[in-house]
Image (cartoon, helix red, strand yellow):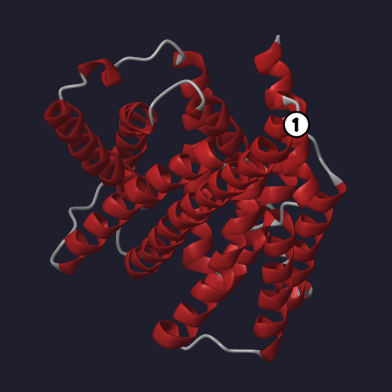
Amino acid sequence: MVSAPSSLVLTNYNLPLSEAIYTIRSRIIAIKSVGWMFGALTSFCLMAIGARELSGQVGIFQILFFRSVIGLVVISFFIISTGHLKLFRSSLIGLHGVRNIFHFAGQYGWFVGIGLLPLAEVFALEFTVPLWTALIACIFLNEKITVKKSISILLGVVGVIVIVQPGIEIINYASFIVLGAAICFAIAYVSTKSLSSKESPLTILFIMCLVQLPIGLCFSLLNWQNPEGIQWIWIAVIGITALSAHYCMTKAMQYAEVTTVVTMDFFRLPVIAIVGVALYSESFKITLVVGALLMLLGNLLNMYVPKNRSKVAISTISRLKGQ
């Protein structure tokens, strides 16, 4: 009896096994990225509630200052408890500086919008971030703008337009402030993606608080007001959720491309719209459901991985091993 060539046996048995392993790993990575983004979504929504509760009572610069203080204490304690003191150091101070200047400006604009516009409109305007992020990532991170990504982002933007139905009343200075904040966030997201490939999320968060604390303090001293009673609770909520939101976002970016992460972030809009209806009697429209479904379709399209992609990846890995 003639036995089959060993190479044929390896091809018949190893290739399907490799495909299965690659598929399982891809799904695990996808689940992790979705899980971290769910944590970010929850954190951002709680932070918005805290910002709305403090609007007009505590200055925005003061809120940002206390947020940095809380974050600095928590992150420092966590790093010291782990014994990894090297996480306090970074060799990319310049990139951290750029990220935090733009992020601080974006946060300020976001808090202004929370106090002047309905929550859903603020989040909707903020969701122009994927457009700016995709362009910036294409230029600075060499990420490709594929047809699939373009369609998914377009569906998300259409969903935002359907929900907000922008008219003359939305085109005011508050809207432009939030749009400016969206551009600042896009630059910060791209910087975070670049940093997350080289540094720990804890280092990124520690330096964020370290840089933004003195900026917030300097501006808040111009009109300082001592918080009272429940205001301290909301300040604590903002400080903790700001930290958890950035940690979750950074972790998500370690498992997915920046444009994929920001596209998944579209789910924040229907959630915050429901919060606005329940807590602040903001109007509910059927267009919210239509827009949310469009965003869901865009997200599913962006996360879909064709089967032939696994074959290409396996062939590439095999070729590299043979070199």
Specify the farthest residue to the front: 1
Q: How many marks?
A: 1
Q: Position of residue 54 (x, y in %)?
A: 32, 64
Residue 140 visible: no
Q: Residue at x 57, y 89 (%)?
A: 283
Quadrant assignment for the N terminus: top right
Residue 3 visible: yes
Q: Is residue 214 above or below residue 279?
A: above
The quarter of the picture where residue 82 lies is: top left
Q: Is residue 117 above or below residue 19?
A: below
The foreground one among 158 and 67 is: 158
Q: Which residue is mark 1?
A: 4
Q: Residue at x 72, y 39 (%)?
A: 12
Circle 1 packing at 10 Å, graded few (<14), some (14-19), many (20+), is few
Q: Position of residue 199 (x, y in %)?
A: 42, 23
What element does badge 1 sit on?
A: loop
Q: Is residue 127 above or below residue 8?
A: below
Q: Residue at x 72, y 82 (%)?
A: 290
Amino acid type at mark 1 = Ala
* In the displayed structure image, the side of residue 134 where residue 29 appears, left or right: left
The quarter of the picture where residue 68 lies is: top left
The foreground one among 27 and 44 is: 27
The foreground one among 143 and 100 is: 143
* In the displayed structure image, the side of residue 225 where residue 10 appears, left or right: right
Specify the farthest residue to the right: 147
Q: Residue at x 47, y 46 (%)?
A: 249
Q: Position of residue 151 (x, y in %)?
A: 83, 57
Q: Position of residue 213 (x, y in %)?
A: 31, 33
